[in-house]
Image: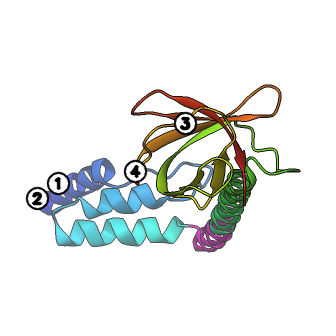
Amino acid sequence: MKTTIKALLLLGAGLAFTMPAVSAQGEKADLNQFKACAQIKSDSKRLTCFDEAAAVFDFAKAKENLKEAATLKAEAAKLREENKQRRLAEEARIKAEKQREADLAALALEEFGQRGATEGGFKEFKSTVVATKKPQFGGVYIKLDNGHIWQNIDKTSAGSLPPGSAVTIKETNLGGFFMIVESSGKSVRIKRVN
């Protein structure tokens, strides 16, 4: 009999050390208490620990917390999607703005040297000669790889301009244009024909 009482006392003392504490005010068990129970090696002690933790666990509160967590998760997902849409819209706006600027620059280059040309924000460009043609009267016509056709209006010659010759077309401060042949460094006044 004494041995049985002694064993029960030792068992009770062991449970006191291994079970999660519940305060005198009836404090509810939390998930950490269930985790502590899972660490107990003895099957019977572990089961007892789980039973006692479950007896004081606030399942209604846990359900409410899960519902709140689900709501917060949904709100976070919605916020992430809104941020993604804002980012995509901003990227599309920037892309459209860059495309508009590129289109304006292409138009300005296409019109460079013509009357009423679009203001392109540049005063020169580089190109290569595709072909030249000497008319019966007037200066040599020079066709460039971008489709421009210019005519030498200077009394001096630009020299030999075989296809592939690199040239720079520059606008002067007074609105005239010069062509500089990169191989020779020669510069002649020109005008846009087409």
- First of labels 3, 2 by sequence position: 2
Q: Find residue 49 and report its image quarter.
A: bottom left
Q: Position of residue 154 (x, y in %)?
A: 67, 35
* Label 4 crowd (10 A; few <14 / some 14-19 / many >=20): few
**Upstream in sequence: badge 3 or badge 4:** 3
Q: Which residue is mark 1?
A: 6
Location of residue 156 (image quadrant): top right
Residue at the farthest left position: 3
Q: Say what amino acid the circle numbered 4 marks.
A: Pro
Could you say where residue 51 lies in the image, as x and y percent from the top left?
A: 39, 72
Q: Which residue is mark 4?
A: 162
Neighbor class of circle 2 (other Cα within 10 Å; few <14, some 14-19, many 20+) is: few
Contact, mark 1 vs mark 2 (Cβ under 8 Å): yes
Q: Amino acid at mark 2?
A: Thr
The region drawn magenta spans 58-74
Quick one: label 1 or label 3, which is nearer the N terminus? 1
Q: Is residue 65 magenta?
A: yes
Q: Secondary structure at mark 2?
A: helix
Mark 1 vs mark 2, CA separation in Å: 5 Å
Identity, as a three-letter code, of the amino acid under mark 3: Ser
Along the line of sight, the residue nearer the viewer: 98 or 17: 98
Q: Nearer the viewer, residue 72 or 142?
A: 142
Is most of the magenta stretch helix, strand or loop?
helix
Which residue is more in the foreground, 24 or 193? 193
Q: Nearer the viewer, mark 3 or mark 2?
A: 3
Q: Is residue 118 above or below residue 103?
A: above
Q: Dot 2 corresponds to which residue?
A: 3
User: Which label lies toward us, 4 or 1?
Assistant: 4
**In the figure, is residue 40 to the left or right of 119?**
left
Tell me: residue 188, above or below residue 164.
above
Residue identifier under label 3? 157
Q: Are marks 4 and 1 in contact (CB under 8 Å)?
A: no
